[in-house]
Amino acid sequence: MTKPTELLHRMGQSLWLDNITRGLLDSGTLQRYIDDFSVTGLTSNPTIFDRAIGKSDLYDSAIAQKVAAGKSGEALFFELAIEDLQRAADLFLPIYKRSNGVDGWVSLEVSPKLAYDTQSTLAAAKALHAQANRPNLFIKIPGTPEGLPAVEEAIFAGVPINVTLLFSCADYLGTANAYLRGIERRIEAGLNPRVESMASLFISRWDVAVAGKTPDDLRNQLGIAMGKRTYKAYCDLLNSDRWRRLANYGAHAQRLLWASTGTKDPQASDYLYIQALASPFTVNTIPEATLHAFDEHGTLDGILSPGGGDGEEVLSRLARAGIDVDAVGVQLQTEGAASFVKSWENLLDVLAVKAASYQKAASHQ
């Protein structure tokens, strides 16, 4: 019997893991996910690394060595993160090569403290990409108003970018335009137009934000409806004259990625967003628990219509019920950026405590 994950892969959607830890790499679990669950990439963020480093001793020896070599703070973190992501990128490299760069990617985020600083974000993106030195590693930049100019400049500079913290269709379109401008400028400058990019739309946080405020029959439907609206815009863009001109020069499309697809409502299906957003030429990056649930008892119920299906009807009904999706979208991006900053600060605090303990131990030797 064909696994649900393989069926999803065959219908044209890439399944990426929304997690990375040194334990996943050391134990061979990530390789098993590639072999058994059709996983073809992964994503990371500050919250993931905060959990990975703060709740594990697997990084301790590496931290001690780097502290002894004079590393601390953000520089220490990025060395640890890049080591993990380089190993993961190497595991995915065969997929990257046989898909001609469309699949097989990992992602590293710039400091979330730079979310509203265009020039610092751009400088960090270039530096981290050079430091990681892997062809299949995205640098993640938040899709804030200040982040989008950095996306355009990074694409123009040839840095592959995964744009994160997108919530609304307007967020996506702003990101898509930044990507297209970067590619158009490369063509005008006589440069290779093939610079890969992702646009990561967060789904489940919509439903968390309006929990208890929607009619019962629309419970856990806002995130899906926003996904459907955005998928229509994505398909329309891929059929536009503007995109076809760039494709004629050899550009690859910026793919749409469904992020935050773990079910938060215990009364809902544990693979709700996987089933609802099955769609060709997109990526779904999912937490480990959701991956296992979908593998064990998941089913697919067709694929998402390029026209967005009933997305607009659902959004209209939610608007009549008093849900202001524009206001919620702005709130979600602001809160998402703040949440990543909090995880970042927690992570740096953990590293500082561990570094201090190693320095103290070394001074007593």
Image (cartoon, rainbow, N blue to C red):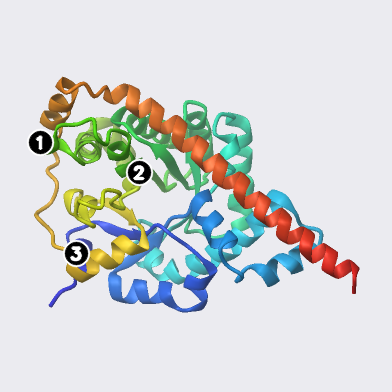
Q: Quadrant of the N terminus?
A: bottom left
Mark 3 or 1, which is nearer the eye? 1
Q: Amino acid at mark 2?
A: Gln
Looking at the image, is mark 2 or mark 1 earlier in the sequence?
A: 2
Q: Earlier in the sequence, mark 3 or mark 1?
A: 3
Q: Position of residue 94 (x, y in %)?
A: 40, 71
Above or below, 212 relative to 363: above
Residue corresponding to mark 2:
254
Label 1: which secondary element: loop
* 245 lies left or right of 343: left
Disc 3 to disc 1, C-alpha distance: 25 Å
Are the residues tagged 3 and 1 within 8 Å (C-beta)? Answer: no
Identity, as a three-letter code, of the amino acid under mark 3: Arg
- State which quadrant residue 351 falls in: bottom right
Q: If you read the primary sequence from the N terminus, does the residue marked by circle 2 or circle 3 appear first?
A: 3
* Of marks 2 and 3, the one in the foreground: 3
Foreground mark, 2 or 1, reads 1
At which x and y percent is residue 2? 15, 74
Mark 3 Cα-neighbour bin, 10 Å: few <14, some 14–19, many ≥20: few
Q: CA distance from mark 2 to mark 3?
A: 20 Å
Residue 310: numbered disc: 1
Q: Are marks 2 and 1 in contact (CB under 8 Å)?
A: no
Measure the alpha-carbon separation of dots 2 and 1: 25 Å
In the image as oriented, which residue stretches furthest toward the right?
364
Residue 10 — which label? Answer: 3
